[in-house]
Amino acid sequence: MGHTSARQPHHPLWTRASHGLNLLVLIVMAASGLQIYNANPVFGGRGGATVPELLTLGGWLAGGRDWHFGFMGLYALNLGLWLALLIQRRRRRLGELGDLTALKTSASAPRRRLSAHRLVYTLMLIVLAFSLISGLAMYKPAQFWWLTSLFAFAEPLGVNSWQALRVSHLATIPAMVLLVVAHIVLSWRVGGLRLLRAMAL
Amino acid sequence: MNRRQLLGLGLGGSSSLLLGGCALNGVSAAVGDASQPLNERLEALLQGQGKVPEFRPDQVEPAALLVNSFNGVPRLDPERYRLQVKGLVGRPLSLDLGTLAALPQHTCVMRHVCVEGWAAVVAWSGVRLADVLRLAQLSPLGGYLLIDSADSYFESWDLASALHPQTLLATHMNGAPLPAANGAPVRLTAPIKLGYKQSKWVTGLRVTAQLGERRGTWEDQGYEWFAGL
């Protein structure tokens, strides 16, 4: 490390552990989810285009379901615990309305970047929670019928609640891909290697 | 570590993930075996005994109900059809369609969910499976129901799900007699189970205390056994 005198800071262990585990579990959930998608594409049904095999996990529908439902518990526990700890101990780290104001009005570019960074990672947690809720509504539509029926919002447009639910759940993948790209770029701009080390190592 | 090294690490890491994905397909069943016992317990706990809310009859989606069959469409002669009920029952039965029609009839407008991901709202009508099992004097020793079909499709259910008030032996679909492709003359339907649990062309019910080696046509290939909704 040589002459750099400042000690490398680290996020608390629970943050780093949840962050790393979340990344791993998320890749498994997305790849196995795309495997399930291929059994009956959300767009086009049986005749619809499928996702390239390279991006899927499981080999066939039952294998994809093995991974998806095998990791969903881990995903839910990790996300739930992480959100609870964040809200209880690091609430000020989460994005808020002030960040939105700073983004629009602040004259300082670093301040705007930091606000954008905070908003992006907070939005990621919201999207992840939404993917869990929409997944539960599809996994147990009979027991959580009230949750599934929330997706009737598109019925006036001729899209039934099941299709709206499938589209919503699937949409969390492209949403997360965009957010992950933004998150990586922004954390690099905000904190560079030092921030990466603080989170990853 | 500089930027270039970091980029290299990222690219290397993601490509090995992609390559690893193919090798990981082989351990899918092991992941399922590790997580399914707990998942199935939670599913059984969630299920409860109560009725699932039903749809309105005008919400049925006949076009959305796709037909899956693992072995073609058997044509059963309604005159010669008999439903055999045996195993751990006090009174084994051989029921013809007239006897089934004389039992109390029920309709359930439910969402039929296929393991593939599609779903369709269907109105199924027929007798409660519970009524047939009680008519056969179901033994308290029974824990599982084995279901045989004319096309040699095989299923097994937990008895709690079989006795659910919305689990029907359906003879009608959307107000008309059951079409051959949908399981005529008698099929199993329930809003609490995935489609592959809902055997078509049902010819035999056997009550047992234990599950055997064979758990179901698709379950034996790797699908979940409880498959609750």
Image: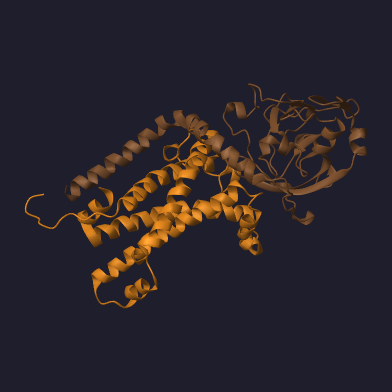
Expressed as whole percent of the image width and height from the top left, the position of residue A185 reads 29, 57
Q: Is residue A34 visible?
A: no
Can you say whether A94 is above or below B166 in the image? below
**Residue at point 34%, 67% (across, down):** A92
Total tally of numbered discs in the picture: 0
Residue in the foreground of this view, choosing between B215 and A9:
A9
Task: Tell me the residue at 60%/44% (across/down).
Answer: B117
- In front of the other: B64 or A199: A199
Q: Residue at x 24, y 74 (%)?
A: A108
Q: Colour of chain A?
A: orange
Residue drawn at x 65%, y 26% is B215
For this rendering, which residue is in front, A84 or B129? A84
Q: Is residue A140 left or right of residue A98?
A: right
Residue A111 % position (x, y): 26, 71
Horizontal side of B10 relative to A61 (left or right) equals left
Within the image, what quadrant is residue B184 found in? Answer: top right
Left or right side of B73 for A196: left
- Name the spot of residue B37 as percent of width and height, x first: 56, 34
Which part of the image, by quadrant, shows the C terminus of chain B? top right
Q: What chain is the brown one?
A: B
Task: Give the camera-side residue of A36 and B142.
Answer: B142
The spot of residue A112 in percent (x, y) is 29, 70
Outermost residue, top direction?
A: B213
Say whether residue B140 is visible.
yes
On screen, residue A9 above or below A24: below
Q: Residue furthest left?
A: A3
- Colour scheme in use: by chain
Residue farthest along the front direction in this orientation = B140
